[in-house]
Image: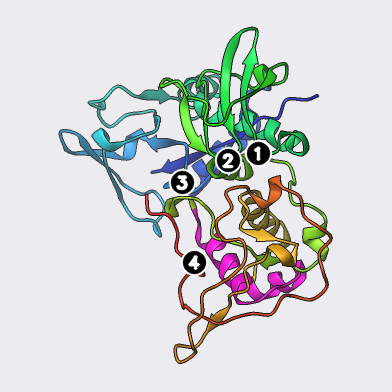
Amino acid sequence: MSIELPVLRLGLAGFSAQQVAELDALLRRSAPGRYIWQIGHFNDADAWWLNGSRVQRVAENAIRIVPAIPTERSLQLNMEEVDRPIGFGLPLAFAPSEPNYTFDPASPASVNQVLEKFESWLQPIAAQFSLAARIIEQESVLGSASYHVVLNGQLLAVVNMLGDIGVFPSAGPADFDDAMWVRQPAKSGIPESFVRTSLSELMWQYALRTTRDVLPKRYRTGLLYFRRPPHLPQRLLSDSHLLVMRELSAGAGVFADLQQRTGMAAAALARILAALYLVGTITSNPKRASVTTIGAVRDEVEPSIGIQHSVVPSGLDGESVPATQPPRRRRLVDFTLPVPLLRR
């Protein structure tokens, strides 16, 4: 079985459009065997590359990055609040006060070297990704039990399919291939040194980082329904995810219909639906659907019904053959989001 590698994203600041294109091409030619690196939105990126020649010191622990593209704005960072690795492209306008990485944007060897350092920093993300991949592969046999994932006597993960999950942060993708899944009593303790997360967050991060198409075929042809809110912090949801959630809460629809309603390209919509599917927010089974819809302010407000509080993602439990007609809907007053989300 081939080892699936996660997509890690770089946010760039201070580079010209030509420099961004050159760095993108350089990433595509990075040494084989590394994780998959892509340029992404700055705020959501796993690591940052800053053009060192366009960095200004504005305070002892604060810097400003002057944009090289006219339509962009300057960016100010408090270095004490940065929670991800930063690489400064040479030449530097001044030496950063905090220890960070430097690299030569024109040198593939220098780029690969800094990416290796980034990957060591981001190893916990890769460990969680690899565990999520194994959970998806074994979903038919895992059920709702708790497990210890063990390799040669070393505990790699504690998996509670109805609760929290802990992952040994230094576990590599290959470790999970040969590991044993040992069933445990419910609510098994998680070591303090492990990275702790929820099943929903684990599946969400996998969906955002996989290059596989994990959306089932029936989700491209049959009716899709809103099931329940994702058990995720609001900060993890993009506007596109919220748009699809709102459209399906207003009424069931097939894939082609959702394309028209959202204006999304097929590939982009498939990725959005795959993430919502893996965390149990959408379903192809009308029996599992929420039957709320968006109503006018004057309409009578009735509570929604359906499976709203299940912690098992729809992608990890069975679904019967979907019907051809959506269930009867009640009315729900709402003009922003279909349901409340977690605030953390």
- Per the image, the residue denoted by label 2 is 162
Magenta stretch contains residue 248: yes
Name the residue furthest bottom. 298
- Per the image, the residue denoted by label 4 is 339
Q: Amino acid at mark 2?
A: Leu
Name the foreground residue: 69 vs 344.
344
Asked which quadrant contains residue 217, the reply is: bottom right
Q: Earlier in the sequence, mark 1 or mark 4?
A: 1
Q: Earlier in the sequence, mark 2 or mark 1?
A: 1
Q: Secondary structure at mark 1?
A: loop
Percent x, y of residue 14: 38, 43
| Residues in magenta, as a range | 237-262
- Per the image, the residue denoted by label 3 is 44
Principal SS element in the magenta part?
helix
Give the spatial CA distance, label 1 vs label 4. Answer: 25 Å
Give the spatial CA distance, label 1 vs label 3. Answer: 32 Å
Question: Please, is residue 228 above or below residue 256 in the view?
Answer: above
At 78% from the left edge and 25% from the top edge, which residue is drawn? 2
Name the foreground residue: 36 vs 132.
132
Front position among marks 2 and 3 = 2
Q: Is residue 51 left or right of residue 25?
A: left
Asked which quadrant contains residue 135, the reply is: top right
Callouts 4 and 3 close, C-beta under 8 Å: no
Name the foreground residue: 110 vs 10.
10
Callouts 2 and 1 close, C-beta under 8 Å: yes
Name the residue furthest top. 152
At 54% from the left edge and 80% from the top edge, which residue is drawn? 294
